[in-house]
Image: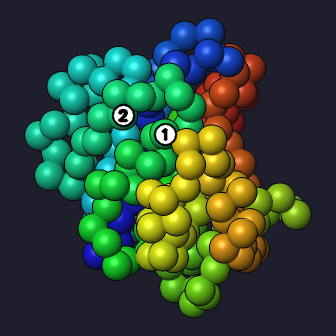
Amino acid sequence: MKQCIMLAAGLSSRMGHWKMLLPWKDLTVLDSALQNALAFCDTVILVTGHRAAELRQRYADRPSVRLCHNADYMAGMFSSVRCGAAALLPGERFFIVPGDMPAIDPNVYRLLWHYRTCYCLLPSYAGGNGHPALLPAIMREHILAAPETETLRTLMQICGRESLPVTSSTIHWDVDTPAQYQRLLTLFH
């Protein structure tokens, strides 16, 4: 089974207001991120936190989306990574991606999945790594055993990381600030 953890628990503090339900084409930022992941993945584990009730109401009836609430989301992103990892079916590789990336080309998921490695795999474009990351099954156990002060980046470095060149710059396009959001809207609308 192809599983993806999608992180949507944060406050969107750099944006100045919550970004997950901002308009994106005829959807929202999070709708589009989910649609792109589900174009290849069987299941997305959507990690909620801030404004969880809105996301639960919006996505609870979608069988391919499993909601996972991180009550401790204020502790930082790694707490959401741990929450999502706990909800995974064990024994399988899995993707992890922020929910504020509405433009990732679904083919990136496919390319990563079909590349065989025992390491953490990141797509790379123009010399820079991006999202989604594809993690080996053992990373679930490392994430769950790690202290709360750990970061996913550090765990990936310890466990080994590999980059796979892709032809899509969309792996870098997240919506962290109003300027980034406007720039992406201009590109895609």
Q: Is residue 46 above or below residue 186?
A: below
Q: Residue furthest top?
A: 16
For this view, does 44 lie left or right of residue 65?
A: right
Amino acid at circle 2 = Asn
Depth order, front residue of 41/49:
49
Q: Position of residue 149 (x, y in %)?
A: 63, 41
Q: Position of residue 23 (x, y in %)?
A: 46, 23
Tell me the number on the disc at residue 22. Answer: none
For this view, does 18 lie left or right of residue 121?
A: left
Q: Is residue 50 above or below residue 43?
A: above
For this view, does 66 lie left or right of residue 23?
A: left
Q: Which residue is mark 2?
A: 70
Q: Position of residue 92 (x, y in %)?
A: 37, 77
Label 2 CA crowd tier, 10 Å (few <14, some 14–19, many 20+): many
Tell me the number on the disc at residue 79. Answer: 1
At 14% from the left and 52% from the top, the residue drawn is 63
Say whether residue 106 is visible: no
